[in-house]
Structure formats: structure tokens, C-alpha cells
Amino acid sequence: MGFTNQFQCLCLALIFVLGAWVPQAMSRTLQDASMYERYEQWMARYGRVHNDITDKEKRFQIFKENVARIESFNKANDKLYKLGVNEFADLTNEEFKASRNRFKGHMCSQNELLSYKYENVTAVPPTMDWRKKGAVTPIKDQGQCGCCWAFSAVAAMEGITQLTTGKLVSLSEQEVVDCDVKGVDEGCNGGLMDDAFKFIQQNKGLTTEANYPYKGVDGTCNAKKEANHAANINGFEDVPSNNEKALLKAVAHQPVSVAIDAGEGDFQFYSSGVFTGTCGTDLDHGVTAVGYGVDADGTKYWLVKNSWGTGWGEEGYIRMQRDIDAKEGLCGIAMQASYPTA
Ligand SMILES: *[C@@H]1O[C@H](CO)[C@@H](O)[C@H](O)[C@H]1NC(C)=O
């Protein structure tokens, strides 16, 4: 009798305790399970494979944190841009930066009082989109090779080539990566757009993407392909630095290579809208300004071509706020701009 009573009492107590505890624990597990399912869908979409379960678990934790960050950012809704769970969602910001952003901008600073060919331009169109003029090739993907500088320079060269010859030809980044190994340029380990222009000029041209396709790893220079020239430039000019007006005059005339600070997490997950930061001016990424405009709400922007595939940003492009208070421009976009001349 006493035993039964005690047992019943214990059971009741247990049920009471469990009753309060189980639903909470279950919902926690369900939430995690649905996040895990989402992670596996994401993995399938981007072709991620993990042979090692600890590695998969580690990536899942990073994914989960990134998703939480992206969703809370988008919920806040006080920004002109949105973030998205893109193919970089299982990378920490440090890992992301290390694999892609290898512009060596800190190694040289640009003059604010340079003379350049567009300096006396007085009027520019209110908007410009070089894609609409047929001067921009489709978005490319540098992969896990830090040769953004080559993509930036080649995109600017594709632009000036189309403007002078009327023909849009996709040119070879891999040739620059493999063959331009003098000075600071070190393929996937980084380089400078201006040095890429110098290399192309000295080589008397650059071959096509089709002839010397992108591999995304450092390779040995193929001298035969290097000697095949599909396009050439006469040289290059730097835009006076820290001057968005000077940059505007240049971008009004041709696509321009620009260096930016793309190191922040917001940039990694940018998905749409006019990007307003946050970012610093520690230049670490080479991209190409291919136009400018004004958003429906009056925000001025630069139209920028990136080399992270079409899954990032607005089909591979980002609109970055233009004419900000700081003379360096947003993310330092006006600090080290340059363009090839033909
Ligand atoms: C711009 O105008 C100044 C003053 O007339 C002149 O010295 C300079 O050469 C011009 N620059 C270009 C690129 O034509």
C-alpha cells in the first residue's frame, strides 16, 4: 500500500516535471531539426559534400549562426539593402576574406592631384549602365582563388575594347594569373589591377577566355596562348583618389577598376538593394564600376560588377551608395580607381 502510494506519487511528480520540460525540449529539437534540414537542402543546392561528420557539424554551426544573423538583419528592415543565405553561408567572415579578397591595395597609395584624360569633362549623363551599351561580359566566378584583381582589370579591359572596336569579347583572367608573376602580382595570392594593366601592355595584348579558360588555381604560363592576342591596351591611368566626382567622370566614359573594402559580413551576404555599409576603407577586393544611377527613393549608387558568380548580390552585381560624406567613398571605392586606355 505504502509502496504503491509512493510509486504513484513519484510518477505524478515525474509526469509533472516532464510535462513542463518535454514540450520545450521537443520544440528546441524540432527547430534544430528543421534548421538541419535547411542546411542539407542548402548543401545539395551548392554541391557541398562532407566526408567527415565533425566537419559537417562545424559547418552546420557556422551556417546556423549566419542564417540567424541574416534573418535578424532582414527583419530589422531599417536598411536600404537585404542580405541572403547565399553559397558563402557556411563560411565565417575570416574564412571568406582569406579565400577571396586579395587585393594588395595597402601597398601603394594613389595621388589626389593626378592629371587624367577625363579631368576637363564638365557634363556627364545622369545615369550610366555599360551593360546596356554592350560593354560588359556576363558575370564570372573567381572561385576560391584570390585573383579578384585580375577579374577587375580584365572586366575594365573588356569594356574599353568593346568601346573602341564594337566587339564584346570575354578575355582571359587565367593568362593574367599564370603569366603575370613579376612584382607584387602573385596569382591566387593577390595582386594589383594597375600591375595587371602593365603586364597586358608589356605583353602587347591578352587572349580570350575561350583560348585560355579560367581554372581558379595558379598554373604555369602557357607561352603559346600568351602570344595569342585578342585585344590590346595602350596603357592605363589612375583616377585622382578620394574624389567621387573624378570617379564619376571616368565611369561616365568607360568601365573602371575600383578597389573596395569587402571584408565585412554584410558584404559577404549582400543580396539586393543599395548597399550602404557597414564597411571600412581597408581595401582588400578588386571589382569593376560599370555604371551609376539613382534609386527610386533618391539614393545615388555605383553599379559594380563582382566576380563571385550570379548567386551573390543582384545577379552578381552590387549597387553601392554614391556621393557619401567621406571623401574615400563607401568602402573606399574612390581611393584606388584606374582604367586601361586604348
Ligand atoms: C585640362 O585643362 C587644362 C587647362 O586648360 C590643361 O592644362 C590640361 O591639359 C587639360 N587636360 C586634358 C586631359 O586635356
Image (cartoon, helix red, strand yellow):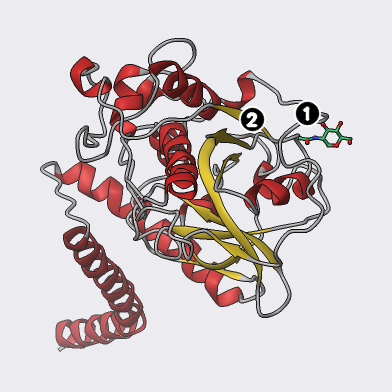
Mark 1 packing: few (<14 Cα in 10 Å), some, or many (20+)? few
Picture quarter with the N terminus? bottom left
Q: Position of residue 23 (x, y in %)?
A: 31, 82
Identify which residue is drawn at 41% across, 63% down: 67
Name the quadrant containing residue 176: top left
> For the residue carrying disc 2, how many other residues have a C-alpha within 10 Å: few (<14), some (14-19), or many (20+)?
some
Q: Which mark is residue 291?
A: none
**Secondary-structure class at tag 1:** loop
Label 1 beta carbon within 8 A of ligand 1: no
207 vs 82, left or right, is left
Q: Amino acid at mark 1?
A: Leu
Please name the residue that numbered disc 2 is placed on. 237
Label 2 CB sits under 8 Å from any ligand 1 atom: no
**Figure check: 306 above or below 76:** above
- Is residue 100 visible to us here? yes
Residue 62, position as x, y percentages in the image: 37, 51
- When asked about the image quadrant of residue 311, the answer is bottom left
CB atoms of marks 1 and 2 within 8 Å: yes
Q: Position of residue 27 (x, y in %)?
A: 32, 78
Q: CA distance from mark 1 to mark 2?
A: 9 Å
Q: Is residue 210 left or right of residue 207?
A: left
Q: Does residue 205 sit above or below 245 in this rendering?
A: above
Residue extending furthest toward the top: 182
Name the foreground residue: 171 vs 270: 171
Tell me which image quadrant ligand 1 sits in.
Answer: top right
Q: Residue at x 75, y 34 (%)?
A: 240
- Residue to which mark 1 is pinned: 114
Q: Amino acid at mark 2?
A: Glu
